[in-house]
Image: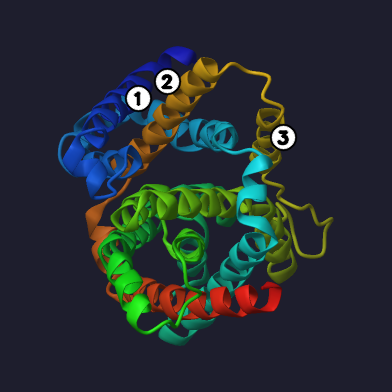
Amino acid sequence: MNRNRLLPGLALTASVAVVAMALGGIGWFSSHGLSALTVAIVLGILLGNSLYPHIAARSGSGVAFSKQTLLRAGIVLYGLRLTLHDIGHVGLAGVLIDALVILTTFGLAHLLGRLIGLDRTASSLIGAGSAICGAAAVMATEPVVRARPEQVTMAVSTVVVFGTLSMFLYPFLYTLNLRWPLLPQGVDAFGIYAGSTIHEVAQVVAAGRSVGVDTANTAVITKLVRVMMLAPFLIGLSAWLLRRSPAAHAGGSASGQRRLPVPWFAFGFIAVVLFNSLRLLPAPVVNVAIQLDTLLLAMAMAALGLATHMRAVHQAGIKPLLLGGMLFFWLIIGGGLINRLIAGWLG
């Protein structure tokens, strides 16, 4: 592909991403858990359904590059936020809770999606976003399930809506648990509960800080361990999809040679986590790399918004929100039950 063809689209998505990062750093946005990624997709949608169609012919190649290649690069660099040492802070209980929450939430997404008549791809996206790490998980799952832009946008919007609700609900649940202890007691225990069940990292921070600093710290570490499970989740999802529909995902006929559509960026993510665990890079370098990663992911989000047609989102109807709501209910109730059972078993 001619590099000059990429420049207009890259410049457009980069501009939207920079604005989104600036807005995401403003107090009101950050306090409400609205990260740069969320703002980027909103700005992208606004432009995509107003000005962008007039320049799509010139910018389309760069926008597509942002939505695909830069997304994968951003997921790989996301590993710089994590180390293997993070696991030690939450212990075996936190790891088991995270794993069970992911498996049960994603499985329930497919079961409930089928019951309400939602297609499997949309159910996978909403399930991944609810189970792991919100918008970033939706975007990482998109190339594996080969979703359409409007499906990704609806899934991102759904997890943002219910993740935002959790920021206001969880502090109330903490107060409620002090009076009627249905969850394990203590600020650390509640931090594990919040980190294992709230959608986005930014939302975990906001909800945890509403309870206390110690709760926020434990919640964030638990959440980062949950994010670390994104890579094995994607690899397992690829294998599952091949087994369910080899013709659609193997790149050939069902009777021909079956080839697993491996999400190689997931292995890159793991490699970066392992490398970051060695602490070889100075902290300032890591911080700059994390800012670059945020830029890449925000550019991918902006590109997604630019490629989204609101008419297609409207045609999706109420079903995605209904599934997101049911999964939100499960995360609160079912996630609380998982926390209580594992804490009691290992306690």
Q: For the residue marked with disc 1, what is the amino acid?
A: Gly
Q: For the residue marked with disc 3, what is the amino acid?
A: Leu
Quadrant containing the C terminus in the rendered view:
bottom right
- Give the total number of marks visible in the rendering: 3
Question: Label 3 to label 2, Cα distance in Å?
Answer: 33 Å
Classify 10 Å Cα crowding around label 3: few (below 14), some (14-19), many (20 and above). some
Residue under the image location 29 percent in, 30 percent down: 21
Return the residue nearer the eye: 102 or 339.
339
Q: Which mark is residue 274?
A: 3
Residue under the image location 39 percent in, 54 percent down: 204
Classify 10 Å Cα crowding around label 2: few (below 14), some (14-19), many (20 and above). some
Q: For the residue marked with disc 2, what is the amino acid?
A: Leu
Label 3 sits on a secondary structure element that is: helix
The residue where tag 1 is placed is 9
Q: Which mark is residue 6?
A: 2
Residue under the image location 64 percent in, 74 percent down: 342
**Do labels 1 and 2 touch, CB within 8 Å?**
yes
